[in-house]
Amino acid sequence: MVFRHVVENYLEYGDPIGSKFLAETMSQRLSPASIRATMADLESLGLLYSPHISAGRLPTEQGLRLFVDGLLQVGELSEAERLEILPQLAERPQHGNLTDLVTRAVESLTGLSSCASLVVVPNQTETVKHIEFIPVSDEQLLVVMVDARDRVENRLIKRPKSITPAHLVMASNYLNARLKGRSIHEVRQSTLDEIRRAEAELDILSAQVIETGLADWAAAPGDNHAPQEKSLIVRGQSNLLNNIETDDLERIRILLEDLERKKDLIELLANAEEGDSVRIFIGAETKLFSLSGSSLIVRGYRDKDRQIVGALGIIAPTRSNYARLIPLVDHTARLVTYSLERTEPGHVHTS
């Protein structure tokens, strides 16, 4: 009872909570002395701490975790909040553009939560219509790829030694026969095994061209120079600077720098893309937020095949109205999933 009142009042007011205040406001009448003894016990358990001698108590991050996991009563979004989110996400993604949809989602989250919002989006799911290898010098080849929307991308790769125009034609024909509307990642996964089984028939040099080209365009997870498999979109970073004390500015600056690097946050969100529930990371529970006094509230979203393909959420101060923010993130992720489930098969692509 005492612990719950300390945390709830801290989340509402942000000040250390004293025994006299609790004795006057709790429905269960306890003396200030009894409350102080209980607070001392909670402090010895690592759930509360006192910022100054003779000050009241504040919850530790461990205490906030206990409260969020076991005592928090999650609220409901108001009808006005639901209606504010719905128009942004109810329409199907334009041209099947997933990035456009989730960007609208995080912009809605930013406005309603007054926090920084973010989303992880899978990269390079565009289907491929044609691919060709063109020699440009003795050291380089130009790979030309045409996607399903007739957009053309060019990329230079290293030219294997002793390669001839005939080898390049063989490599192009081999790949184009296997595209059939698949993404470059799908082609790579199926093609590499085939190459190893059929190198003699295909010709070693042609196989080398194919492997080099596909590795550059769709590097596998774990490759040292692999491009990120997912992209991070962040909105509302300026909200991190609202309602903070001067002493907190340096911690927020560090967090903003971490957001710019993005890689660590993408890895963190990838770990959150599990299950069908909102996940909460409080302060030092992640190395990313350990110095910023921030929490991450996040949930995964699914595509038309019911596969979790990304995650969205908000970065909030550790002292936040979790009862409101949790359903806000949950509802937005559900709407994104609903919109993707209604998308025509094969029509959801990232930019």
Image (cartoon, helix red, strand yellow):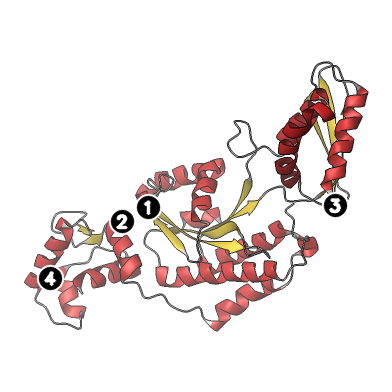
Q: Are marks 2 and 1 in contact (CB under 8 Å)?
A: yes
Kindly identify which residue carries mark 3.
148
Q: Earlier in the sequence, mark 2 or mark 1?
A: 2
Residue 77 visible in the shown view: yes
In the drawing, what numbered circle is on residue 61? 2
For image coordinates 62% across by 47% down, the residue present is 230
Cα distance between the residues tagged 2 and 1 = 7 Å
- Under tag 1, what secondary structure? helix
Q: Earlier in the sequence, mark 4 or mark 2?
A: 4
Residue under label 4, please give it.
35
Q: Work out how far the residue at label 4 is from the one at label 2, CA to CA, in angstroms.
A: 21 Å
Residue 115 location (% of width, % of height):
50, 61
Which is nearer the N-term, disc 3 or disc 1?
3
Q: Which-is-in-front pick, marks 4 and 2?
A: 2
Q: CA distance from mark 1 to mark 4?
A: 27 Å
Query: Residue 150: where, in percent of width, then height?
Result: 89, 49
In the picture, the disc for residue 283 is 1
| Other-residue count near label 2 (Cα within 10 Å), few / some / many at <14 / 14–19 / ≥20 | some
**Of the two numbered discs 2 and 3 in the rendering, the one whose residue sits closer to the viewer:** 3
